[in-house]
């Protein structure tokens, strides 16, 4: 059986230089740029809510939420741009990568397509697991209320996976906070079965 071996078309540094000249946002899978598809308004509101609630709870703690243009280096030369990422390490002016990311959030948009969803649910689980400093990877649904939380076990690259729902708290012990799921979905509307908009809160 023959195996196709991918050859990188650019290095990580070449990607950074290339990406700065582009009008659209891209990630780097270690081989070539990958266009980041636009999310819908739910995606945007959820990402905003995550940043707002993290900022309010982490102020003065030494930990800082970053994104959307804060890069996370993963496997090989790959660079991902999560919807939110928290670091508790000092950042340097002009740096293109987040130092020692601790918690990562990705918001899933059904409008992004099956390929993008596969990357967030499968590929990035493996990539973020390979980054020793990342203790928790939170996948946030935007078509309904629900979080899939991947928590690193004490040793190795294995995750413990739990589901967090509407009335729950999202525990983030790595950064010393808890977030009510309702805050993440504040002002987010979902179509009801009768095609009317309803809110989870």
Image: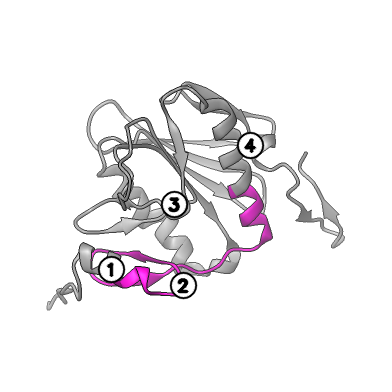
Callouts 1 and 3 close, C-beta under 8 Å: no
Element under disc 4: loop
Of badges 3 and 2, nearer the viewer stands: 2
Which residue corresponds to the image point at 63% horizontal and 36% vertical from the top-left? 165
State the CA–CA distance, disc 1 to disc 3.
Answer: 20 Å
Label number found at residue 24: 2
Label number found at residue 165: 4
Magenta region:
18-47
Element under disc 2: loop
> At which x and y percent is residue 69?
43, 55
> At which x and y percent is residue 45?
66, 51
Q: Quadrant of residue 152?
A: top left
State the CA–CA distance, disc 2 to disc 4.
Answer: 33 Å
Q: Earlier in the sequence, mark 1 or mark 3?
A: 1
Residue 175 vs residue 63, the one in the foreground = 63
Label number found at residue 82: 3
């Amino acid at each position: 059986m023959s195996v196709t071996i991918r050859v990188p078309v650019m290095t990580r540094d070449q990607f950074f230089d290339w990406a700065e000249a582009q009008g659209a946002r891209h990630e780097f899978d270690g081989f070539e740029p990958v266009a980041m598809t636009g999310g819908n308004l739910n995606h945007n509101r959820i990402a905003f809510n995550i940043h707002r609630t993290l900022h309010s709870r982490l102020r003065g703690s030494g930990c800082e939420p970053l994104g959307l243009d804060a890069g996370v280096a993963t496997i090989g030369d790959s660079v991902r741009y999560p919807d939110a990422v928290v670091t508790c390490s000092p950042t340097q002016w002009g740096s293109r990568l987040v130092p020692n990311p601790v918690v990562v959030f990705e918001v899933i948009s059904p409008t992004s397509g099956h390929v993008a969803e596969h990357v967030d649910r499968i590929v990035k689980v493996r990539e973020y697991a390979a980054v020793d400093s990342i203790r928790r990877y939170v996948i946030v649904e935007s078509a309904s209320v629900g979080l899939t939380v991947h928590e690193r076990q004490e040793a190795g690259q294995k995750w413990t996976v739990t589901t967090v729902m509407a009335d729950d708290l999202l525990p983030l012990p790595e950064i010393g906070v808890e977030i009510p799921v309702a805050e993440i979905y504040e002002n987010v509307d979902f179509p009801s079965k009768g095609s009317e908009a309803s809110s989870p809160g």
